[in-house]
Image (cartoon, rainbow, N blue to C red):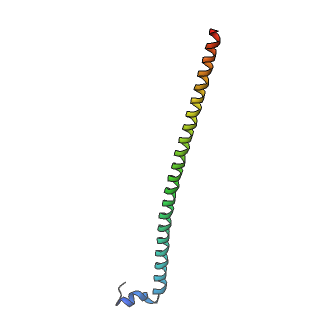
């Protein structure tokens, strides 16, 4: 379809208001969807980073606790072995 002027193009044979309104609403919805998707993606990335930091801290604490338990167990075993050895020699 060919239009004689730009105003005739905008008028679209009397249906311009509905045509341009539908284009405007569609464009606004697509832009809102894109914006929402980008913000949701950023939020997911931030949540993953926070979870990884928390997991890293928990791993460090568990390792420290295990190291402390291991040292305590080794000290207790060494003390028991020493006491047993003293009992045998006496």
Whether residue 37 is situated above or below residue 80 in the rendered picture: below
The residue under the point 46% across, 71% down is 31
How far across and down, in percent of the image, does residue 55 sit? 54, 46
Residue for point 52% across, 53% down: 50
Viewer-proximal residue, 8 or 25?
Answer: 25
**Displayed quadrant of residue 88:** top right
Rendering coords of residue 90 (x, y %): 64, 9
40 or 5: which is nearer to us?
Answer: 40
Give the residue drawn at x 35%, y 85%: 2
Q: How many labels, in total?
A: 0
Residue at 47% across, 67% down: 34
**Picture quarter containing residue 72?**
top right
Judge whether 20 appears above or below 53 on screen.
below
Q: From the viewer's perspective, is residue 27 above or below residue 64?
A: below
Quadrant into which the N terminus falls: bottom left
**Where does residue 37 sit, x and y in percent of width and height?**
49, 64
13 and 84: which is toward the camera: 84
Residue 69 drawn at (x, y percent): 59, 32
């Amino acid at each position: 379809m060919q239009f004689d002027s730009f105003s005739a193009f905008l008028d679209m044979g009397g249906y311009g208001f509905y045509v341009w309104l539908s284009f405007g609403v569609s464009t606004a919805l697509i832009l809102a969807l894109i914006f929402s998707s980008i913000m949701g993606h950023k939020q997911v990335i931030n949540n993953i980073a926070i979870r990884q930091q928390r997991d890293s801290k928990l791993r460090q604490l568990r390792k420290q606790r295990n190291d402390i338990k291991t040292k305590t167990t080794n000290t207790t075993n060494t003390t028991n072995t020493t006491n047993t050895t003293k009992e045998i020699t006496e």
